[in-house]
Image: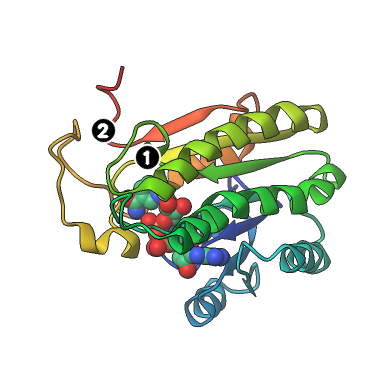
Amino acid sequence: MGKLDGKVAIITGGARGMGAAHARRFVEEGASVVIADVLTDLGAKLADDLGERAMFAELDVRDRERWTDIVTQTVQRFGRLDVLVNNAGIFRRESIETHSHEMWDEVIGVNLTGIWNGTKAVIPALKAAGGGSIINVSSTAGMTGYAWLPAYTTSKWGIRGLTKTSALDLGQYGIRVNSVHPGFVRTPMTEELGDNTANVALHRTAADTELTPLVLFLASDDSAFSTGAEFIADGGESAGLP
Ligand code: NAD
């Protein structure tokens, strides 16, 4: 028996990195998965590899109309929707002086408004399913300030607020909403950053699969009493924060 038998999930940013790791594991655990991403080639190939219980949907999370279409397509293809993993994210590393307005709009649009769009779009389907789980991917950058990441850090703090408000509003329908806070994970996003682990208690970075058990827990009924909460997996990077 899988931990997600019979459940249906949409994973944004599911074509590569941590999102792809979640998609693979979710299918292994019995779920049907919609991989929603702007990367059409990678996403379609992954869905192909995963077989009948996977589908690729081209989605820019900023596109509200497309969100509505994808939820409809998901329910048409798999019969219901239980889980949304709001994982898509982008990173623009610039000092606040050189970080452009365009970069700000782009990062806030994808990382924060994208989660708002997804949350709004799935509410009717999750209500129809009798409840569900929304997992919002924040970061340790949502728990402390980071230099050179003004929009990214702001978006990841914003996700915490949106998560808590969503949890309070949607609990009455059995819809749970939690945030996850990865530390330094080796994915295409962090390729250019080197490997500075001086502030990480475990003195290492994580593989792209290491957040999946936490996301799986939050998607499954094992976390049935958790909502509005923050789940950290960062090798102890935030352990020294006041
Ligand atoms: P990644 O770059 O490998 O994956 C991000 C995915 O999001 C990609 O598939 C990308 O195509 C997709 N995406 C980007 N813009 C999109 C859009 N507008 N619409 C739909 N999809 C879009 O990076 P990752 O490290 O796997 O990141 C996954 C999440 O984890 C992100 O939210 C990121 O901010 C967060 N995170 C990453 C780290 C880390 O160290 N890698 C740490 C903390 C949080």
> In the rendered image, which quarter is residue 234 located in?
top left
Q: Is residue 18 visible?
A: no
| Disc number lying in front (1 or 2) | 1
Amino acid residing under circle 1: Ala
Residue 119 coordinates in the image, percent (x, y): 70, 47
Tell me the residue at 66%/48% (across/down). Answer: 116
Residue 166 coordinates in the image, percent (x, y): 69, 34
Reply above or below: 239 against 149.
above
Q: Quadrant of the C terminus?
A: top left
Ligand 1 within 8 Å, label 2 CB:
no
**Label 1 Cα crowd, 10 Å radius (few <14 / some 14-19 / many 20+):** many
> In the rendered image, which quarter is residue 110 located in?
bottom right
Per the rendering, the mark at residue 55 is none
Reply above or below: 222 against 61.
above
Residue 4 coordinates in the image, percent (x, y): 62, 48
Q: Secondary structure at mark 1?
A: helix
Q: Is residue 27 visible?
A: yes
Amino acid residing under circle 2: Glu
Q: Residue furthest top?
A: 242
Q: CA distance from mark 1 to mark 2?
A: 11 Å
**Foreground residue, 210 or 36?**
36
Ligand 1 within 8 Å, label 1 CB:
yes
Residue indicated by mark 1:
141
Residue 111 coordinates in the image, percent (x, y): 52, 53
Is residue 132 shown left or right of residue 183? right
> In the rendered image, which quarter is residue 143 located in?
top left
Tell me the residue at 62%/29% (across/down). Answer: 164
Q: Residue furthest front?
A: 97
Residue indicated by mark 2:
237
